[in-house]
Amino acid sequence: MPAPESDALVYRAALSACSTLGFIAPDAQVLAHAWQARWERTGNSAPELWRSVAQDFGLQLRPHVAPFAACPQQLGLYAVLPDAAWVGRMARAGVPTVQLRFNSDDATAIAREVRAAVEAVRGTDALLFIADHWRDAIAAKAYGAHLGQEDLDALSAAEEQDLRASGLRLGVSTHGYAEMLRADAVRPSYIALGAVFPTTLKRSATAPQGVAPSAAYAALLRDYPTVAIGGIGGIGAE
């Protein structure tokens, strides 16, 4: 069990329970504090209600102050793709949301592929997000960018402001409760949850969790557009 951060009885009981249930330490801490907050708010510590109210977790009230630009509440099938050619195929096939996840150490190649992906969705209704390479996404006038937790943590305050001011939509990957709070702090356009199923395009930060935990995450984040991280038939999908 992680070291307790409070002597409050409900918090300590919840921390022990969450640790026994197998939650990683940061998530166990978040859940335990939320359980204590709900007890203080309602006097009710029933376990069936333990993780459903955003204010108990300290999630920001909506509408947010200075959020990232909005995206549709329902993003539909969200295909994560390795290059611009695949982006174009899926956009022309009618996939509503596509993400370019192009891996290279060559900055010139990255910029070229991002520009090609933007061109590939031109004339379609597909919304294009660029994974990781947000500066190139801004330069190419993509619809949005998508960042993982490490990418988010690497942003300076000035870079975050530049990204917000650009008008790009921002999606953030999360794999549990602590990461949800981190994502919520930047007021993104949508939050990705998971991993629900394995994906072949990127090694997930956690083992696939299945549908039930992700349903609980989505219920907590119901005011956000959310997508599920997972894999479909060898083509990454979120």
Image: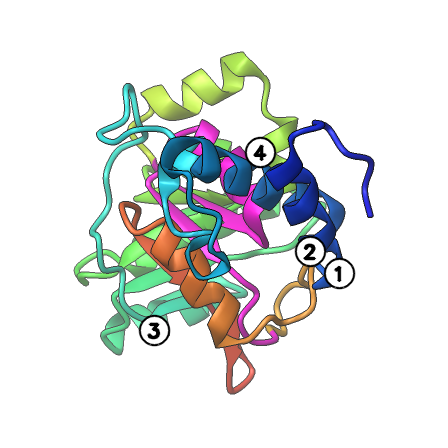
**Dot label at residue 181:** none
Relative to 53, 28 lies left or right: right
Q: How crowded is mark 2: few (under 14 residues within 10 Å), some or many (20 or more)?
A: some
Q: What element carries label 4?
A: helix
How many numbered markers are drawn?
4
**Residue 190 falls within the magenta-colored stretch:** yes
Task: Verify CB contact (< 8 Å) between mark 2 and mark 1.
Answer: yes
Relative to 118, 131 lies left or right: right
Name the amino acid, label 4. Answer: Leu
**Dot label at residue 20:** 1
| Quarter of the view holding residue 78 | bottom left
Disc on the earlier residue, 2 or 4: 2
Can you identify the residue that label 2 sits on?
17
Mark nearer the viewer, 4 or 3: 4
Q: How far apart are marks 1 and 3 (CA)?
A: 43 Å
Can you identify the residue that label 3 sits on?
90
Please give the range of residues in magenta: 169-198
Can you identify the residue that label 4 sits on?
152
| Residue at position x 70%, y 27% in the image | 6
Task: Verify CB contact (< 8 Å) between mark 2 and mark 4.
Answer: no
| Quarter of the view holding residue 95 | bottom left
Q: How crowded is mark 4: few (under 14 residues within 10 Å), some or many (20 or more)?
A: some
Disc on the earlier residue, 4 or 1: 1
Mark nearer the viewer, 4 or 1: 1
Position of residue 212 measured from the top left corner of the image (x, y, whole percent): 48, 73
Relative to 58, 31 lies left or right: right
Q: How far apart are marks 2 and 1 (CA)?
A: 5 Å
| Residue at position x 52%, y 43% in the image | 35
